[in-house]
Amino acid sequence: MFEDDIAKLQKKIDPSGTLNLVQSLDKTLQRMNVKRQAYNGKSFVGNHVHKCLQDGNIDMLTNAVIEEVKAVSPEYQDEATTICTKFNKLLKMFAKCHAGYSKCDYMEAEEIKELETNIDCLMAFYREQFPNAKVSPKMHILEDHTVPWIQKWGFGCGFHGEQGGEHVHADLNNIRYNVRGLKDDLEITKCVMKEHWTQVSPTTQKFKPEAVKKRCKTSM
C-alpha cells in the first residue's frame, strides 16, 4: 500500500516515468540489511519483520521518500510528508501489536488487555485513514482471533512457533542439567517433563512442594 501511494505520487511528479521513488524504499531496506522474498508477494521473513518494525527503521523508511521528493521536486514535499506520516503512524501502531502478540512467555491479564487495546486502535486508524482498503485474512485473524487465542492458552503466539520451540528446548536443557545426578534415563525423562509442566502451567505451581533444605551434620 505504501509503495502504491508513492507510485501514484511519482506519476504526478514525473509522468515520463524516469523518476523512481519506490526505489528509494528498496535502497533503504538494503541499508537496514533487509531483503524481501522473491515469492509470496515480496513478503519478509520473520527476523526482517522484527527489524523493519523498530521505530528508528520505520522513520528511516518513511523519511527516505520525503528526502527524495524534497531533492527532486520540492513543491510536492508536503504531499509526500502527508503520505509518509500516515504510514509511519500505521507501522508504529502495528509494531506495538506485533511486540504484544509475538511473545513466547506467559502473558498476564494486563498485557493481554494492552494488546487488545493496541489492536483496536490499529484497526480503527486503518479503517479511518484507508477507507477503500480491504481487511486481509491476516488482519481479520489479528483483530478477531488473536486475543481470544492468547486468553485461552495464556501464552503469546510466539510460544507456538519457532521461537517457542527454541524457548522450550532451552528450558528443557536447563532442567536436564539440574537433574544430572540421576542415572536412569526413564527417571531423568520423568523428572524433566514433570518439572517443565510445573513451570509452564500456573495452575500446577501452587501444588509444587517446597524444597526441603538438608540439615547440616553436627559433630559429636
Image: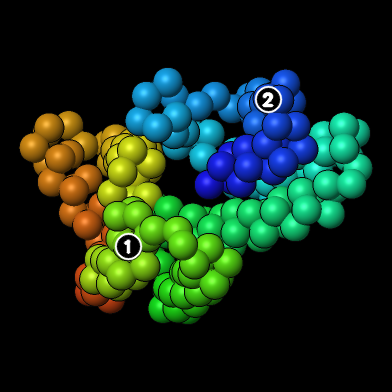
Residue at left 68%, top 36%? Answer: 11
Is 8 located above or below residue 81 in the figure?
above
Position in image of residue 128 (x %, y %): 54, 72
Which amino acid type corresponds to the residue marked 1 in the rendered image?
A: His
Position in image of residue 170 (x %, y %): 37, 38
Q: Nearer the viewer, residue 101 or 202?
A: 101
Is 85 located above or below residue 33 in the figure?
below
Residue 184: mark in rendering: none
Give whichever of discs 1 and 2 has the lower sequence position.
2
Residue at left 89%, top 46%? Answer: 75
Q: Nearer the viewer, residue 35 or 107?
A: 35
Is 204 located above or below residue 82 in the figure?
below
The residue under label 2 is 17
Give the farthest residue toward the front: 16
Residue 161 position by quadrant: top left
Which amino acid type corresponds to the residue marked 2 in the rendered image?
A: Gly
Of tags 1 and 2, which is closer to the observer?
A: 2
The residue under label 1 is 140
